[in-house]
Image (tube, rainbow, N blue to C red):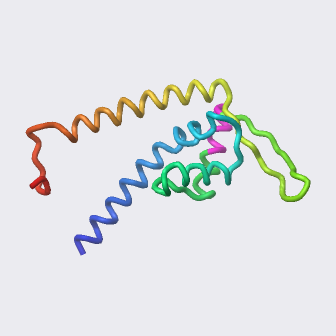
Amino acid sequence: MAGETDAEDRKSIERELKRGALELIVLHLLAPGEAYGYEIVAKLTAETNGTLAITDGTLYPVLYRLERAGFVSVRWETPQRGVPRKYYQLTDTGRAELVRLKREWTSFSGSMSKLLSAKGVRHDDDR
């Protein structure tokens, strides 16, 4: 039972960390140029070897929030064969937000690394 709870807690923490970083992740993936939803999902999966894989159902609400905030612009394209695709591209405001979020994440992750590697702090599983 305790092992199941530990695994659930780890997944919960991982899910919350991912949720908190999704805007940064999406803005980062759009920095090189425009992409449509499936491309963003595929890039994220490929670039993280599946560790940060997300579904369309997770991505699209993030994209809608970024669009409403003015961080991404959209355009529709209909290929000769196939369904119309909505392409997302960073705006200048989105690029500024990406810089801000990267700075915040770097500060946070640096502080966490420093804390977790602090000498003199002992954990039960540090043997």
Q: Position of residue 125 (x, y in %)?
A: 14, 57
Quick check: 92 above or below 127? above
Along the line of sight, which residue is nearer the eye, 11 or 43? 43
Pick the residue in front: 104 or 79: 79
Q: Image quarter for residue 113?
A: top left
Q: Residue at x 56, y 28 (%)?
A: 97
Give the image location of residue 122, x and y in percent.
Answer: 10, 47
Q: Residue 68: within the magenta?
A: yes
| Residue at the (75%, 39%) spot, across then down | 74
Residue 2 or 44: which is nearer the viewer?
Answer: 44
Horizontal side, residue 81 vs residue 16: left or right: right
Q: In the image shown, does 125 or 13 lie closer to the viewer?
A: 125
Residue 85 is left or right of residue 26, and the answer is right
Q: Position of residue 57 (x, y in %)?
A: 61, 58
Residue 84, magenta (yes or no): no
What predominant SS class does the magenta segment belong to? helix
Which residue lies at the image location 37% right of the left edge and 60% below the top edge?
Answer: 11
The C terminus, quarter of image: bottom left
Q: Answer with left or right where residue 114 lies relative to residue 65.
A: left
Name the residue at the right extreme.
80
Residues rendered magenta in the picture: 63-71
Image quadrant where one finds the N terminus = bottom left
Q: Is residue 119 above or below residue 36?
A: above
Q: What residue lies at 62% left-to-right and 34% top-to-bottom?
A: 31
Indicate the position of residue 29 as horizontal and vertical percent values: 59, 40
